[in-house]
Amino acid sequence: MNSWPLWEVFIRSKNGLSHKHVGSLHAADAEMAMENARDVYTRRNEGVSIWVVESRHITASSPNQSEALFEPANDKVYRHPTFYDVPDEIKHM
Amino acid sequence: MTTEQQVDYILRLGDNALILGQRLGEWCGHGPVLEQDIAITNIALDLVGQARNWLALAGEVEGKGRDEDQVAFLRDAGEYRNILLVEHANEDFAYTIVRQFLFDSYNYYLHEGLAKSSHEQISAIANRSLKEVTYHLRYSSEWMIRLGDGTEVSHQKMQQALNDLWIYADEPLIADEVDEAAHQAGWGPNLAELRPLVEAKRKAIIQEATLTTPEVGYPQQGGKQGLHTEELGFILADMQWLQRAYPGAEW
């Protein structure tokens, strides 16, 4: 059973929100992955939609490159909307 | 329909769910893989939840003031009304799946009929359970096909399980006077009309699973009338010892 491939599971918690990665599982094929995802990850009403994708189809960024990829954004403060005064009455900003 | 027949009819529904739920619960921590361990115990919990509704209703109709726990935990084997199929041992995953499929293929169409019951509570419980039962049938059908049409070993194990369990496959479809009375009263479906639907479903899945339908001279029955295999005594011993040893114990 260890030969079953690994699948990544994404769940949309309600309509209007995007699918979020919730974890992974083993399954022989897409159909079984879907059923397993339903049983393992939506037992407590977590979702309205499931995506499963075999883990080998995901291309991940390398931790070694994280400096080159992400640090240049750190000193570009002007990309962050932090210079506005938000009035107190406005919520959810 | 006499009160006794009414209680019997509802007990059959509740006891099938309770005993199969208890059986499936034995897989907890022993599933072939983590994902199936969870899947099977999910189904067990669905069934125990359904059993609670049915047994509470049975206690109500009986009118002797018994609640769902007293009905579940303080009856002896001879008072249980489940079919023989559901008390059969888990054996291995193949037996568990075949038992589940034979039950689900009946239980699904039964619930479709019960959902149209003239009895308000029966129809309400059946409607609520139908979604769960639909998923159970999908799950067990899927595994029938996957393992039947799988490897040489999985095929052989599934055929063996099917051969052994087939003698219990017919009991739920054989109507006795309680089933007849329930149908007359509009409480539940006519089993004679259910039979072709159940048989067609079983035939289609067994065929897709590349398995062979066994031949049975005469089906085993008696569970619905309280005549059980010795298996039930062991299940009840497991299930009831705590309430028997410590009456009224709570969490």
Image (cartoon, rainbow, N blue to C red):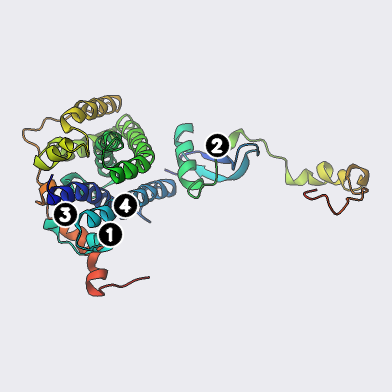
Neighbour tally class for label 2: few under 14, some 14-19, many 20 plus, Cα within 10 Å: some
Neighbour tally class for label 4: few under 14, some 14-19, many 20 plus, Cα within 10 Å: some
**Residue drawn at the location 19% of the way across and 56% of the way down:** B62
Q: Which mark is residue B80?
A: 3
Q: State yes or no: discs 4 and 1 in contact (Cβ < 8 Å).
A: no
Neighbour tally class for label 3: few under 14, some 14-19, many 20 plus, Cα within 10 Å: many
Neighbour tally class for label 1: few under 14, some 14-19, many 20 plus, Cα within 10 Å: some
Chain of residue at mark 1: B
Front residue of A32 and B12: B12
Front residue of A58 and B197: B197
Q: Earlier in the sequence, mark 4 or mark 1?
A: 4
Chain of residue at mark 4: B
- Secondary structure beneath disc 3? loop
In front: mark 3 or mark 1?
A: 1
- Secondary structure beneath disc 1? helix
Q: Which mark is residue B68?
A: 1
Three-letter amino acid code at the position of disc 2: Ser
Chain of residue at mark 2: A
Same subunit: marks 4 and 2: no
Q: Quadrant of residue A73?
A: top right
In front: mark 3 or mark 2?
A: 3
Same subunit: marks 3 and 2: no
Same subunit: marks 4 and 1: yes
Same subunit: marks 2 and 1: no
Three-letter amino acid code at the position of disc 4: Asn
Three-letter amino acid code at the position of disc 3: Tyr
Q: State yes or no: discs 3 and 2 in contact (Cβ < 8 Å).
A: no
To which residue does mark 4 refer?
A: B53
